[in-house]
Image (cartoon, rainbow, N blue to C red):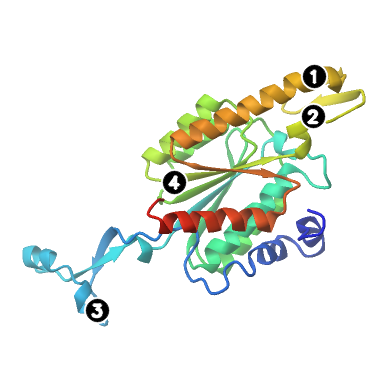
């Protein structure tokens, strides 16, 4: 991220709040609706009429049946709920740069929190490894942003990864339907991950995957003998990276292809982020693409 926004410096000097504001500043200029929501005007729900409501929005059919005055509300008028899930397992503690995958995920989650709450929508947080470890229930307002950022700032990654099991478990416990933004490396059993994503979708949520990977994990570009301290109880091994690189890269790329294919089959977005990538540019590019797509009639 040289030559552009450096969240590591901002985080060290002033904390997550400045990271979040700096990433989001400019993107929301002139916007009053969350870029996560679509542009559809599909019917969402009824609510009771209150003096001052426009009469043209009354549902006269309901009035004829029940003598009740109710207003029709549409998807674009109702609050968007964003559940932010951050993988805090031990594998996220890896980093070949000056920051780890978890720190990068934390910056992303902080920026998304700020963006959602600035648009007067609702945000909540779940930090997890093989189970839920910390939860900030969905709310709105400046106090909610402080609570979420404090939870992200205090958390230390550790524990084994059980992404699919956690998604499956959470699908029945997230009370408010909405966007589920998942920040993880997704280095886990793909069958279980897909089953968890499918369960979230069936429950009425829209999962969005933000896969965070260190550049060294993509290339395994190490030219000297190293000692690998396995994360999550994998043990210690001395290896010659040159002898392993081809097999490793093939396995890594196979995992990436399968993850992309299977999320696409579910109709879900999966954004791949390198921790060397400019954070602001990556998120704004995705959100702009999402907004443009929704204007074309797709989710």
- Element carrying mark 4: strand
Which mark is drawn over residue 203? Answer: none
Query: In which quadrant of the rendered view does residue 111 lie?
Result: bottom right
- Element carrying mark 2: loop
User: Which of 62 and 288 lies nearest the eye of the viewer?
Assistant: 288
- Other-residue count near label 1 (Cα within 10 Å), few / some / many at <14 / 14–19 / ≥20: few
Vertical placement of residue 217 versus 51, above or below: above
Gap between marks 2 and 3 measured at Cα: 62 Å
Query: CB atoms at circles 2 and 1 under 8 Å apart?
Result: yes
In the visual, does 235 lie left or right of 139?
right
Residue found 48% across the figure and 58% down from its top = 291
Residue that badge 3 annotates: 54
Earlier sequence position, callout 3 versus callout 4? 3
x, y percent for residue 208: 51, 45
Residue that badge 2 annotates: 220
x, y percent for residue 4: 77, 60
User: Which of 217 and 83 lies nearest the eye of the viewer?
Assistant: 217
x, y percent for residue 254: 62, 25
Which mark is drawn over residue 206? Answer: 4
Query: CB atoms at circles 1 and 4 under 8 Å apart?
Result: no
Residue found 48% across the figure and 60% down from its top = 122
Residue found 76% across the figure and 57% down from its top = 7
Q: Nearer the viewer, mark 4 or mark 2?
A: 2
- Asked whether the viewer can see residue 234, the reply is no
Gap between marks 3 and 4 measured at Cα: 32 Å
Query: In which quadrant of the rendered view does residue 260 lie?
Result: top right
User: Which of 95 and 274 lies nearest the eye of the viewer?
Assistant: 274
- Element carrying mark 3: loop
Residue that badge 1 annotates: 244
Vertical placement of residue 100 versus 120, above or below: above
Gap between marks 4 and 2 measured at Cα: 33 Å
């Amino acid at each position: 991220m040289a030559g552009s926004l450096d969240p590591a410096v901002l985080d060290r000097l002033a904390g997550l709040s400045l990271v979040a504001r700096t990433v989001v500043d400019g993107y929301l200029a002139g916007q009053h609706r969350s870029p996560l929501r679509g542009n559809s005007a599909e019917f969402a729900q009824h609510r009771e009429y209150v003096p001052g409501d426009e009469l043209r929005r009354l549902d006269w059919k309901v009035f004829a049946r029940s003598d009740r005055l109710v207003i029709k509300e549409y998807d674009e008028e109702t609050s968007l709920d964003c559940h932010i899930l951050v993988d805090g397992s031990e594998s996220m503690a890896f980093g070949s740069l000056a920051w780890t995958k978890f720190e990068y995920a934390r910056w992303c989650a902080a920026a998304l929190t700020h963006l959602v709450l600035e648009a007067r929508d609702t945000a909540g947080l779940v930090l997890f490894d093989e189970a839920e470890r910390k939860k900030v229930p969905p709310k709105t307002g400046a106090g909610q942003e402080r609570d979420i950022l404090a939870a992200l700032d205090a958390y230390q990654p550790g524990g084994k990864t059980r992404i699919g099991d956690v998604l499956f478990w959470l699908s029945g416990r997230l009370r408010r339907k909405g966007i589920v933004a998942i920040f993880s490396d997704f280095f886990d059993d793909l069958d279980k991950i897909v089953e968890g994503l499918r369960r979230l979708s069936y429950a009425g949520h829209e999962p969005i995957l933000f896969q965070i990977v260190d550049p060294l994990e993509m290339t395994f570009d190490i030219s000297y003998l190293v000692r690998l301290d396995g994360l999550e109880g994998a043990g210690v091994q001395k290896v010659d990276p040159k002898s392993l690189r081809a097999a490793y890269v093939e396995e890594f790329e196979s995992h990436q292809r399968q993850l992309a294919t299977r999320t696409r089959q579910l109709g879900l977005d999966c954004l791949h982020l390198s921790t060397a990538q400019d954070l602001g540019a990556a998120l704004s590019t995705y959100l702009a693409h999402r907004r443009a797509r929704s204007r074309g009639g797709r989710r």
